[in-house]
Image (tube, helix red, strand yellow):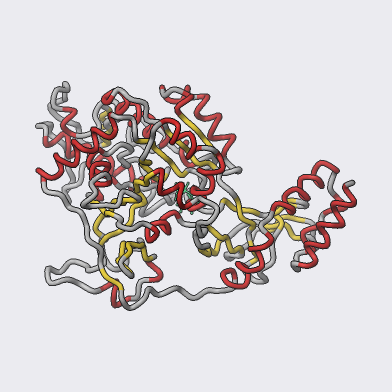
Amino acid sequence: MLSERLAKIRELLEANGQAHLLSGWDHLQDEARTLLLDQLQLLPWDTIGVVRDSIVHQVESHPPPAAIDAPVICDPSPDESVELFDRGAEMIRAGRLAAFTVAGGQGTRLGWNGPKGTYPATPVSGKPLFAIFAEQLLAAQRRYGVVIPWYIMTSPLNDAATRSFFLDNKCFGLHRSNIMMFPQGTMPSFDARTGMLMLSGPGELAENPDGHGGALAAMARSGALADMEARGVTAISAFQVDNPLVRVVDECFVGMHETPELSSGEVSSKMVDKIDPDEPVGVFCQIDGRTRIVEYSDLQRDLAEERQSDGSLRFHAANIAIHLYSVAFVQSLTSSDAEPLPWHRALKKSPWWDASSGSVLEPDEPNVVKLERFIFDILPRARRSAILRTRRACEFAPIKNASGADSSASSRRIQSELYGGWLQDLGVSIPRDAEGHVSASIEIAPLTAMRKDDLRAADLPAHVEEGGSILL
Ligand code: UTP
């Protein structure tokens, strides 16, 4: 039986020029052999050859077309914000909102030994990222008297660890039945030099999660979309796992998304102002009447540097990966006749198994091409996509790197800065250094306050010590 399967798969591999994948076969036990054959059989063979020829070997960027424009940004006045807030609050109160976290990434730059959502992120208590989001959901559920179900996309590599973390922490006070986890798909990794598929060990195919864009297929396959529909959810608040300042439930953003004059209600996004032309972020653009994100590496220099009469960058709207999708829109994108999202190529360093020496080798240089789908490629599929301006200092403190920019240290500083500002506005004396930065660690838990106004009735200290720490 096994030998029959082996013969068929060998034929398939030879036809695709990938026969080396069986090179560790003789050293494998039967169980490992069956697993390998299962893996090889399930590979998307109809696309592997095509993507290898068209993407793996291709290194040039994709400059956007000449007819590119800056998109319209929604920057509501205080009065308009109140209106949007009320509209959003009504929608949330009706139980129509769900939260969705993409948490399937490998977090290689951070180098944390575990799912990124378990990373201690806050400046005083070192609360894990997942706990911050859970507390925000708890606070919003209490405020609105509804259930806000939470969907979390893991990957086959971190699914079990993520589930255990939630169980060990009693789901951070949320009801277990309102949290649904599901793994995303994978894609085989390619040898950057030869375009061949690779092994990570004898009989182990090297694979990587298929990108946050894998969320579409994963939401459909897992039944998450059907579950949302059954619960009466119509909109999904979607965010990445590594931003402790994300507002999981943002009434004003939901209100904008639900306003037909502003948005077709299919997908809406938040933006912050790009710091300078060199900041490596994707920017929102308008191309052929549709909103899309052009990656940093694809935006020509002259466009990246172009300024408006007031001195601001023309392409200033930086993507911070915070979106709202309608359930109906995601369903339409996952139907059998919908065109799949494109693949993007990333060159990475990854250990691999060398059949000739029979050992796992650590490369010195990037050696692997990983193919990933990006969720923001759904934007141009929407008829009219709205973008809300928000302030970086209030909503964006990502933890991507082990040190420097976008690291745990920079994120903690941004968090202390924000909460220090709230307290100062409410009369607390806050220590600052010569450059005016908060020189203490300050943390305000989501269950204490979701926004500054929630603290007005709180018992606040008169001052915070220089170099001290305070947790409210
Ligand atoms: P990043 O692009 O920062 O990737 O993911 P990463 O895998 O976390 O980190 P590096 O690049 O290996 O250092 C942004 C968000 O998208 C999720 C991540 O979990 C994070 O929330 N993501 C990324 C997925 O869910 N799946 C993927 O395949 C890739």
266 on left or right of 119: left
Q: x and y percent of residue 17 in the render? A: 76, 68
Q: x and y percent of residue 195 in the render? A: 66, 69
Q: Quadrant of residue 382?
A: bottom left
**Which residue is painted at 23% across and 74% down in the image?**
306
**Which residue is painted at 53% across and 48% down in the image?**
217
Q: x and y percent of residue 353 in the render? A: 72, 57
- Considering the image in quadrants, where does the C terminus appear? top left
Q: Quadrant of residue 290?
A: bottom left
Using the image, determine if residue 270 lies above or below residue 134: below
Examine the rendering and report whether any part of residue 215 can be seen: yes
Q: x and y percent of residue 359 in the render? A: 76, 55
| Residue nearest the viewer, comparing 12 with 384 | 384
Examine the rendering and report whether any part of residue 107 can be seen: no
| Residue nearest the viewer, comparing 14 with 382 | 382
465 on left or right of 325: left
| Residue nearest the viewer, comparing 452 with 80 | 80
Q: How many marks can you see? A: 0
**Which residue is painted at 15% across and 49% down in the image?**
76
Check the image and name the residue furthest to the front. 337
